[in-house]
């Protein structure tokens, strides 16, 4: 594969459900586009879908991401598998007497990696260890995609979204260590303020994460519904005078989301 066809793939997951993955991903997509990046969007499966007036199913999250990316390709290409029940995808599919197609989860990524996009953001379903089909958790799908990407010449990094609230330190450390043990270390963390009634820990969560956790903090949303703030490597040193722990993934993310003047 020629160099111009290579894409950076980011698999976005969370420490749990309802942590703001879609919001953070959409803001990151907008920021990358402002930098001149061509951004593709892939949400392999969605549950809790709605029905349009014409009877067609749609995912609010998938449409939010599609709009943020400038409506590339089609909404059906963004999210090819849609289920109605507000359950995990395999449970939602079972409610309809069917199954999530695991091969389609993986193979649906290929059309986003044909040279049209510099970056492809892939949003999982729920947390990193939530089931996404009968045979796979989200991390299993991410590993499948990473192996495929390596064969095709694309890089894949894992981005974790975590809520900026009391308990986030435990959530991030436990998720990152479990992910590393499973063979897919987390390349970057986005800290998300879920509402405007933040608890007192919001004043120190960033510093504590930088001190105690090896996952590079690449960006944050510092007020509910606010903009994405991208960090530089200096933040890691502020936690305790040590050298930056940013990985290749976070450096690449920073490069792709830095305004170019």
Image: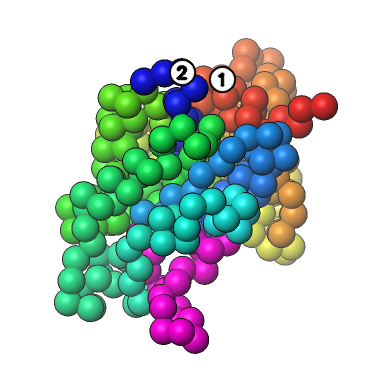
Per the rendered image, the range of residues in magenta is: 45-65
Q: Is 85 situated left or right of 71 in this image?
A: left
Q: Is 102 situated left or right of 251 in this image?
A: left
229 in the magenta segment: no
Q: Does the rendering let one see residue 162?
A: no
User: Residue 75's spot in the image, x, y percent?
Assistant: 47, 61
Instruction: Indicate the quadrant where residue 183 lies.
Output: top left
Judging depth in this view, the residue of 212 and 127 nearest the camera is: 127
Residue at point 17% right, 77% down?
97
User: Residue 76's spot in the image, x, y percent?
Assistant: 41, 61
Q: Is residue 38 above or below residue 255?
A: below
> Tag on residue 245?
1
Instruction: Indicate the quadrant where residue 77 lies.
Output: bottom left
Mark 2, Cα crowd under 10 Å, few <14 / some 14-19 / many 20+, is few
Quarter the N terminus occupies = top left
Q: Residue furthest top?
A: 243
Instruction: Indicate the quadrant where residue 229 lies.
Output: top right
Secondary structure state at the residue bearing disc 2:
helix
Residue at point 60% right, 58% down?
67
Q: Is residue 134 above or below residue 122?
A: below
Q: Nearer the viewer, mark 2 or mark 1?
A: 2
> Tag on residue 3?
2
């Amino acid at each position: 594969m020629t160099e111009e066809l290579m894409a950076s793939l980011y698999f976005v997951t969370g420490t749990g459900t309802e942590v703001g993955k879609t919001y953070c991903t959409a803001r990151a997509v907008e920021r990358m586009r402002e930098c001149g990046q061509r951004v593709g969007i892939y949400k392999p499966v969605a549950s809790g879908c709605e029905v349009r007036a014409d009877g067609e199913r749609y995912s609010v999250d998938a449409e939010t991401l599609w709009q943020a990316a400038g409506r590339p390709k089609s909404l059906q290409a963004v999210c090819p598998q849609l289920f109605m029940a507000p359950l995990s995808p395999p449970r939602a599919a079972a409610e309809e007497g069917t199954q999530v197609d695991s091969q389609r989860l993986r193979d649906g990524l290929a059309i986003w990696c044909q040279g049209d996009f510099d970056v492809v953001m892939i949003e999982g379903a729920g947390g990193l260890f939530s089931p996404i089909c009968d045979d796979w958790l989200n991390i299993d799908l991410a590993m499948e995609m990473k192996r495929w990407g390596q064969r095709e010449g694309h890089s894949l990094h894992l981005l974790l979204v975590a809520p900026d609230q009391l308990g986030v330190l435990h959530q991030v450390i436990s998720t990152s260590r479990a992910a590393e043990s499973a063979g897919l270390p987390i390349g970057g963390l986005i800290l998300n303020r879920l509402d405007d009634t933040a608890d007192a820990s919001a004043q120190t969560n960033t510093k504590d994460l930088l001190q105690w956790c090896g996952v590079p903090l690449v960006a944050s949303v510092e007020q509910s519904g606010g903009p994405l703030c991208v960090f530089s490597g200096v933040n890691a040193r502020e936690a305790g005078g040590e050298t930056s722990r940013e990985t290749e993934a976070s450096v690449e993310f920073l490069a792709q989301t830095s305004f170019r003047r």
